[in-house]
Image (cartoon, grey):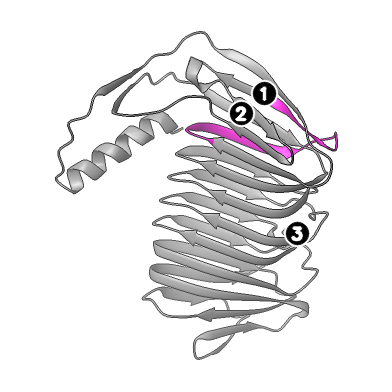
Amino acid sequence: MKRNPFLFILAVVLSVSMACSLKFDLPVDEITTGETVIEPIKVDLPAGTAEISITFGAGELEISPGSVPGSIAGTAKYNVADLKPVIEIDEQEVSISTGNFEITGIPNIDEDIVNIWELEIGSSPVELKINAGAYKGNYDLGGLAITSLEITDGASDVELAFSSPNQLEMETFRYVTGASNLEMTGLANANFESMTFRGGAGDFKLDFSGQLKRDATVQIESGLSHVEVVIPETTSARVVFRGGLASIDASSAWDKSENEYILNGTGPTLTIYVDMAAGDFDLLTD
């Protein structure tokens, strides 16, 4: 069943209040729909490295590679006036945000709310930040020129792929999420030096397939969750577990020594440190 992100927000608010036995005396926000608008988005990026910030509430967000360097192009489809995107440019900083939509009380939400963004980013150098709420995300960042990547979201359902190598060295890659379903593939193609992943209670898959061009370090921190890490058998890799009560299931390709698992591949080395409070951790090869 397809989850309506707006209704999901309401479910989270109500479940938290009941679980904590809290009483809220908040106004009711009447959120009504109107005519569906399809609005073009077109941004010419500044020369040099553009600092792109995308702020998205609830709905569906899709980002893919564009054919025109130095630009962001796409559409926003919405049927609530306050969801109209706002674009701001200040020298190197480019901000695209979800209008003036705010929830200050208990939302009375029309289940037919529409908020869908489809964006294409050209292959000029960018620092990319995405800040989202309860939403569905689909990102293909392959072939872009990302120098740093930071994604923060709430209760989400996200698929992220680097379908081809990142054109530039990525200094840092940071992903922080809540109670989410997340699948990331082609992560070696991101060409990062260091990566940090922090997740709450959820189901997370990190697939490090692709071309590992240099030594890279990954920090994984998770609560009560299921984490699956997949690394090509030909990769040189080391995974270190540093505490927690997680149940670890490693495939036969891994050599175990105390709290470390070693994959005897060739080329640059991928080193992963894991801090997991509880849950299941699957360490696989392909």
Quadrant position of residue 166: bottom right
Q: Are marks 1 and 3 in contact (CB under 8 Å)?
A: no
For numbered disc 2, what is the local secondary structure? Answer: strand
Q: Which residue occupies 61% across, 38% down?
A: 54
Q: Please provide percent x and percent y for residue 110.
A: 37, 18
Q: CA distance from mark 1 to mark 2?
A: 6 Å
What's the magenta region? Answer: 56-75
Q: Quadrant of the C terminus?
A: bottom right
Query: Is 61 within the magenta?
Result: yes
Q: Quadrant of the N terminus?
A: top left
Residue beneath label 1, please? Answer: 75
Q: Please provide percent x and percent y for residue 180.
A: 45, 49
Residue beneath label 3, please? Answer: 189
Query: Is 103 within the magenta?
Result: no
Indicate which disc, 2 or 3, sits on the residue closer to the N terminus: 2
Q: Please provide percent x and percent y for residue 61.
A: 59, 34
Residue 132 relative to residue 142: left or right? left
Residue 117 circle label:
2
Which of the two discs, 2 and 3, sits closer to the camera? 2
Return the residue found at the far top.
35
Q: Amino acid at mark 1?
A: Thr
**What is the total number of numbered labels drawn onto the structure image?**
3
Q: Amino acid at mark 2?
A: Trp
Q: Are marks 1 and 2 in contact (CB under 8 Å)?
A: yes
Q: Which residue occupies 55% across, 76% down?
A: 273
Quadrant position of residue 284: bottom right
Q: Which residue occupies 46% across, 40% down?
A: 133
Secondary structure character of the magenta stretch overall: strand
Indicate which disc, 1 or 3, sits on the residue closer to the N terminus: 1
